[in-house]
Image (cartoon, rainbow, N blue to C red):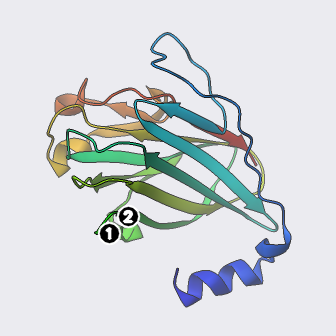
Amino acid sequence: MTQSELDKMINLNLFEQPIVSVEEIDLLLGNNYSINGSTVTQYGVTTKIIKSCSTECLVVITSTWSLIPTINSYDVIGFRLVNASINTVNKATITGTNYSLTYQPSSAQQFSNGFGYSVKLGNVFGMKITTSMYATTSGTVFGSYQHANYNVSLATSQLYTISPAGYGNVFNFYGNAMFKYNNATGVDITL
């Protein structure tokens, strides 16, 4: 965390606000389910969305691997907003055993209703992928982390729009990216 990020959190008085995270579901191989909650565990990954709000909301999505993925390609993580607006897109990070990458907001694909990051996985244990944003204090945020089941290029991983019809209610892949991702269940939270 940079000093400016910390200063913004202090100025918004977020340390005095409640952090909202409801543990709702532990989902095992649920291709026939369309359940959204604040936490989902599926395909060896736990994805969680949390918020803390004052005059604006800090919304964070984190996906944590419980195993080492066999495909280490470009995965996608991000948000879709309904009746809400993005104020600031924050960086994305990947950490793991002897592995660390940071993606600046300029590398996010931004749309009017959300954004996504393409992140390069490592062949390491304990990977944790995180991104966040500041948003308005009303509406709903949908979060999604999609793992590539095949080796894909950065350009292919960016072939999506943000749509409720997409994987995890966020990423609507097209072109060469179609059917390359695992269609993991998304998470959501009300602001």
Q: Are marks 1 and 2 in contact (CB under 8 Å)?
A: yes
> Which residue of the protein is positioned furthest toward the top in this rendering?
32
Q: Quadrant of residue 107?
A: bottom left
Residue at left offset 66%, top offset 87%: 7
Instruction: Check disc 1: other Cα within 10 Å, few if <14, some if 14-19, many if 20+.
Output: some
Q: Amino acid at mark 1?
A: Ser
* Residue 9 to residue 107: above or below: below
Secondary structure under the numbered disc 1 in the rendered image: strand
Residue sitting at x 50%, y 21%: 28
> Disc 1 versus disc 2: distance between alpha carbons?
4 Å
The residue that mark 2 highlights is 95
Image position of 128 with respect to 17: above or below = above
- Residue at the image position 23 percent from the left and 31 percent from the top: 149
Q: Give x and y (percent) for residue 88.
A: 56, 67
Q: Is residue 158 visible?
A: no
Is residue 18 shown above or below 23? below
Percent x, y of residue 169: 51, 30
Q: Is residue 124 visible?
A: yes
Between residues 179 and 62, which one lies in front from this camera angle?
A: 62
Q: Secondary structure at mark 2?
A: strand
- Above or below: residue 77 compared with residue 37: below
Amino acid type of the residue that numbered disc 2 sits on in the rendered structure = Thr
Where residue 96 appears, as percent x and y from the top left, is 35, 61
Which residue, given by chain and number where applicable, does mark 1 sit on? 100
